[in-house]
Amino acid sequence: MKSLILTDDNPRDRGFLADTLQHYNPVLTANADEALDACAHDPEPWIITDIQMPGDNGVELARKLWSEKPFAKILFWSQHSDETYVRALSKLIPAETVYGYLLKNNPADVLLRATQSVFQDCQCWIDPQIRSVQARTKRSCDSLSDAEYEVLIDIALGLTDNTIAERCYLSRRGVQNRLQSLYTKLGANLDVSHHHNNSELLNVRARAVSIALQRGLINAFELKNAEDMFSEWLAKQNKNTE
């Protein structure tokens, strides 16, 4: 019988999945590496995975798996509807595969229906709350380009225009152009012309980060990863100047 690989770093959540889906011959794994090992000999594995996990998260697990096995079926089971994850997944999903995205606040019967839809009926299952996020990522008026998203992460880390320019091999004007486009798409540029001292009414840079947090474009988990990458870059810069 084909196995269903269940991947979650939280033992309680793994237990809930195993109990609910016991007739699917579940194989329990706690991280992306264990999941990849478990499906190594199956050309079209079935996996239910959390997204936010230590080490490689669920998005990175999907990237590695689909790069070698594009017909693998994955149901993402997460408490997060953050736009950053929906955005990342949209760039990875092979045209020929079936997948699902279900939020953890759904009851067991919905989990069972989603599991049957993805793995047995070969139909995509997208949580209604995720559909609204997907729609926003596809609207040209407020969906961010890769360059705009990159500069959003940089300002969330507190980087100056000069540092961003150095990291991205851009001119200062190039950075400012990206920032202005970002501010417009996020709606961070408020009309403050009626205010008697509009130059001190708000900090557009901080407001852009605030809006991005509210939209789920950035979160603490992904910012920690970005912080680690920046620290590595900074260490190399310091080494080169020694």
Image (spheres, rainbow, N blue to C red):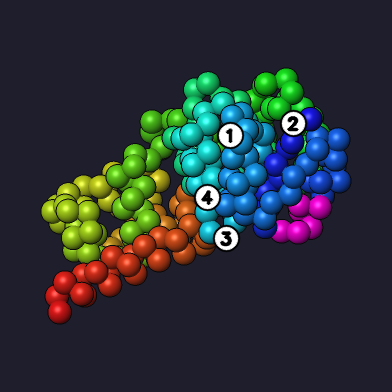
Q: Earlier in the sequence, mark 3 or mark 1?
A: 3
Inter-mark Cα distance, 1 to 2: 33 Å
Q: Is residue 187 visible?
A: no
Categorize mark 3 by other alpha carbons within 10 Å: few (<14), some (14-19), many (20+).
few
Q: Residue at x 76, y 52 (%)?
A: 14
Q: Is residue 204 left or right of residue 46?
A: left
Q: Which residue is mark 4?
A: 216
Q: Which residue is mark 2?
A: 2
Q: Amino acid at mark 2?
A: Lys
Nearer the observer: mark 2 or 3; the answer is 2
Nearer the observer: mark 3 or 1; the answer is 3
Q: Is residue 241 visible?
A: yes
Q: Residue at x 62, y 51 (%)?
A: 34
Q: Which residue is mark 3?
A: 54
Q: Which residue is mark 1?
A: 132
Inter-mark Cα distance, 2 to 4: 36 Å
